[in-house]
Image: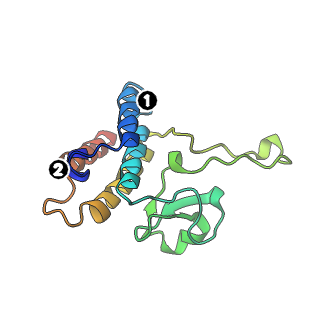
Amino acid sequence: LCDAALPEREGPPGLFHGLTALFEALESEYWGAVYVMWEIALLRELGFALVLDRCAAGGDPATLAYVSPKTGRAVSEAAGVIYKDRLLALPAFLKPVFSPPVSACAGDVPPASGGGRGGAEDVLKGLKLTGYFLEHWVFVQASNGVPAARRQFQERFEKSLF
């Protein structure tokens, strides 16, 4: 993926450190979420930053659920419900973590999402999300499209779930 996407002889230091962190995370149960976050960093490094911390439609950032395939910006559940067939799913581990209001009772506190953790189904959502933007933003002009190894990785990951 790096070989196909990055300019020759350029090594963005942030991406290198992210790749090092990914290698260290391969032994952990969260390696998939870390990989998706690394692909998001790759997109950002290439000039295709996703905006996943606020709603593109002005909705509540605590209820982000989708990403617009046109803009790469997150959309809240309420704002995106009528367009959900055309939007990409936002995995829970990529959603911003919000603290409940101080006045909230203990029983009213929603479980925290985000924080870098993700189950296999959320990782698959993340792979589909980054895969979409790799295909339509980064490799759109490439004759071979997204590298075969990346496509096969996602396909094998998806097959491993079922």
Report the front residue among 70 and 110.
70
Q: CA distance from mark 2 to mark 1?
A: 25 Å
Q: Earlier in the sequence, mark 2 or mark 1?
A: 1
Answer yes or no: is residue 25 visible. Answer: yes
Camera-near label (2 vs 1) is 2
Left-right relation of 33 to 57: left
Q: Secondary structure at mark 2?
A: helix
Which kind of residue does numbered mark 1 sit on? Glu
Q: Which mark is residue 29?
A: 1
Where, by quadrant of the figure, is residue 13 drawn?
A: top left
Q: Are dots 2 and 1 in contact, CB under 8 Å?
A: no
Callout 2 crowding tier (Cα within 10 Å): few <14, some 14–19, many ≥20: few
Q: Please name the residue shown 35% across and 29% down the image.
A: 23
Percent x, y of residue 118: 48, 40
Percent x, y of residue 73: 49, 64
Percent x, y of residue 69: 40, 67
Quadrant of the drawing holding the C terminus:
top left
Report the front residue among 57 and 5.
5
Left-right relation of 80 to 134: right
Of all residues, the one furthest to the top in this rendering is 27
Q: Please name the residue shown 39% across and 35% down the image.
A: 17
Q: Please name the residue shown 54% across and 70% down the image.
A: 80
Q: Disc 2 designates what residue?
A: 148
